[in-house]
Image (cartoon, grey):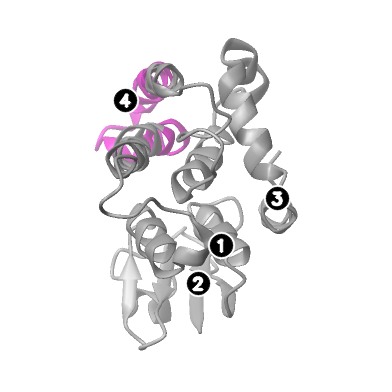
Amino acid sequence: MFTLYARPAAGSAAVEALLAHANTAHEVIDVPKNADGSAPSWFLKLNPRGEVPTLRLSDDSIMTESAAMMIYLADLFPSKELAPAATSRQRAPYLRWIVYMAANAYPSDLRMYYPERYSTDPGHAEGVKKKAINDLWHDLAVFNEGLGDGPFILGKTMTAADIYAAMLLSWAPDVAELFARHPRLKGLYDSVAAHPEIRRVWDRNGMP
């Protein structure tokens, strides 16, 4: 059984959705924040950075980093076809785009929502936020151009990369504008959300 340490509307949503879609035994524990925004001491023992998601595996070991969890869990349940096989020609684009979103769109989102974290000078926050928004629009435009006929990254089959991307699309500063600019991204998001078990997770996390 897996234990996912999470917070609503956080980066844990995609991992929670994958676990639900895989129909595997798991528990979700929402991690509160202290009054100053820090993580509670008990959670810091599991993840010294105090970040969610944090995943306790069936052997009681701890895993961090959301993209790594998505890759690991998708490979763990091959019958769900959430990841191409290592020998498949589709493995390279699958890994490319899940890591692209983790390395580019995710950090841009964080800078946009928490600009004060990225400078020791509070006066820099507004500039950090504006640059992050510009970067995010560019990151998602590049992702859109990389999509083929869709609706998913690899065509007709949904993978863990699509679930992860859908979560990040929902964090755009203006989701309606994003989807108006890039209808293919809306198609990907809607196709992921059409899975009932994922829709339930999205609803729990307050996602559109």
Amino acid on which disc 4 is placed: His
Q: Can residue 34 be seen from the camera position used here? A: no
**Closer to the camera: disc 3 or disc 2?**
3
Viewer-proximal residue, 92 or 133?
A: 92
The location of residue 154, given as percent across then percent down, is 45, 35
Question: Element type at marker 3?
Answer: loop
- Tell me: 53 left or right of 187: left
Q: Is residue 18 above or below residue 150?
A: below
Which residue is the site of mark 1? 16
Q: Mark 2 or 4, which is nearer the eye?
A: 2
Look at the numbered disc 1 and give the secondary structure of its residue: helix
Q: Residues within 10 Å of mark 4 (few under 14, many from 20)?
A: few
Label 2 crowd bin: few (<14), some (14–19), many (20+), radius 10 Å: many
Mark 2, residue position: 4
Span highlighted in magenta in the image: 109-135
The question of residue 190 being in magenta is answered with no
Residue sitting at 38 percent across and 50 percent down? Answer: 84
- Kindly report the distance in space between the C-alpha atoms of the residues bearing marks 2 and 1: 7 Å
Main secondary-structure element of the magenta-colored stretch: helix
